[in-house]
Amino acid sequence: MRNALLALALVSAPALAQAPSNVRVNSGTYQVDSAHTQVVFTLLHLGTSLYTGQFTQPTGTLTIDVGNPAKDKVDITFPIAKVSTTVPALDAHLQKPEFFDAAKFPEGHFVSTKVPIKGTTATITGDLTLRGVTKPVILATRFVGAGVNPMSKKTNVGFTATTTVKRSDFGVSYALPMVGDEVKLTINAAFVAE
């Protein structure tokens, strides 16, 4: 949901032997695969059910330095106008000023500040910006796999990351407390080698 995701320094580790093509992940820059990356949000609705939506077509990069993981970095931007739920009228409402105010703040953004790796996981610290407000967040991140795309012949790597934020911290307080303040974010990220 920008994940300087992790276990890339461990490319030869046994955990990667289960990756699709047992591909070595090399240092370099990887682009977000927008068609296969999701920034998903889940929150409590009326205190009785969970409701999920997503921001689609994010863009960004993952920079990997296998020799110096401290230089790993992730940077993801997601367009607010691409918010998607199961209800088109709600999608339009979420773009209004009382929610994300897409006209004034057209993008959400995450950029990492630190990516400590432990095995095939990482606890990525970074800054999340919504509605012009930037707050630090911590993403619990897990390496999913690496492989060569049989069509493009390029190396693909994937991660999943989660965090929980309070929407009111970003100025999104409409309908509190009927609609929950705590929002679970999940970033399912696919990256393609340049």
Image: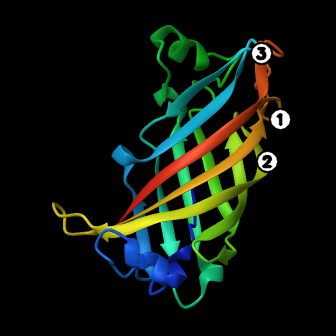
Pointer 1: residues within 10 angstroms few (<14), some, or many (20+)?
Answer: some
Q: Is residue 168 left or right of residue 54?
A: right
Q: Secondary structure at mark 2?
A: strand
Distance from Cα at disc 2 to Cα at disc 3: 26 Å
Q: Secondary structure at mark 1?
A: helix
Q: Quadrant of residue 164?
A: top right
Tell me if I can see residue 147 in this picture. yes
Q: Position of residue 168 (x, y in %)?
A: 82, 29
Q: Secondary structure at mark 3?
A: loop
Question: Mark 2–mark 1 contact, CB under 8 Å?
Answer: yes
Q: Earlier in the sequence, mark 3 or mark 1?
A: 3
Pointer 2: residues within 10 angstroms few (<14), some, or many (20+)?
Answer: few
Residue matched to label 2: 135
The amino acid pointed to by label 3 is Gly
Q: Quadrant of residue 80?
A: top right
The amino acid pointed to by label 2 is Lys
Residue matched to label 3: 47
